[in-house]
Amino acid sequence: MADYASVPAPYRVPDDATSRRQFPPAPEPLPVPVIDNHTHLDFRNGLVEVSVQDAMDAAEKVGVRAAVQVGCDLESSRFTVEAVDADNRLLGAVAIHPNDAPRYAEKGLLEEAIAEIEALAAHPRIRAIGETGLDFYRTHGDALTHQFSSFRRHIDIAKRLGLALQIHDRDAHDEVVKVLAEEGAPDRVVFHCFSGDARLARLCNERGWYMSFAGTVTFKNAENLREALAVADPSLVLVETDSPFLTPAPFRGRPNASYMVPYTVRAMAELTRTELSDMCDELNKNTRNVYGSWS
């Protein structure tokens, strides 16, 4: 592979590996370091397993100085607490993912799981409840009852603990907004991997909800996301990888990692006709407003 030498060392795989399993080359460093607002360092999507420290070292070299590590079930939420203790470049979010809520409910364990999430969220470096929300793409029928119940419970925890809420919203925009209105939204709401259109972006502007854009904004078939970014209030815009998923173009389909944030930041700056350093400054300010200080 022609770009093998420029892949960060922890992410290199054998030369004979298929291209879809190979991590992309490292991007040019950003002029002002930023923060990856959503990553899953415990997930593996490729041929290598990278430690938390190695992942953050690789990211820091290209101007990604920190990240928010996100839990999706009890196992990954426990990992998140361990990770934020192990590396001060990380803050965390913990939750039961909407697609996992029915799985816990079928075993009669959803209430117990949510109770543990609340206990984990008491850690001082856990700054958000998430990812939680609604997913009508993978979950259907009666199982949705558990999604709605879990989402409402997570909203309550976020409000009582004074934490941000990271929302997973897939094919469920109107319903997510409705639940937030019914329950009363926390002070800080983030639509993780924003997947709406300009209409939802304008609604987020009105309500002061943050929109976190991932590599999907660079996809050829994602004109709705570019239209949303164009109208989004710059003070409500964040950036994330959702790694190891959603690798930005031109590497779509290959594994993602926090070190690839600069590809998306540069695309966002170009799309909004913003100076790159100004875009980085704005993203940093917004991230601090949501999650507080990393120090």
Image (spheres, rainbow, N blue to C red):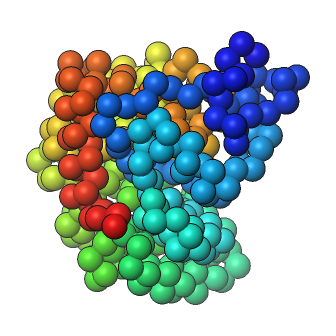
Q: Which image quarter holds the C terminus?
A: bottom left
Seen from this angle, which residue lies furthest right?
Answer: 16
Tally of numbered discs: 0
**Percent from the top left, x then y, of residue 112?**
58, 86
The front one of 81 and 202 is: 81
Judged left or right of residue 127, residue 74 is right
Q: Residue at x 73, y 29 (%)?
A: 22
The front one of 66 and 167 is: 66
Q: Which image quarter holds the N terminus?
A: top right
The front one of 11 and 92 is: 11
Q: Which image quadrant for residue 201?
A: top left
**Percent from the top left, x then y, of residue 258?**
52, 43
Judged left or right of residue 268, residue 231 is left
Task: Give above or below for 63 relative to 67.
Answer: above
Q: Residue at x 46, y 61 (%)?
A: 90
Q: Which image quadrant for residue 158?
A: bottom left
Seen from this angle, which residue lies furthest left?
Answer: 206
The front one of 217 and 7 is: 7
**Percent from the top left, x then y, of residue 217?**
40, 28
**Percent from the top left, x then y, of residue 102?**
61, 67
Q: Residue at x 42, y 72 (%)?
A: 126
Q: Residue at x 75, y 22 (%)?
A: 19
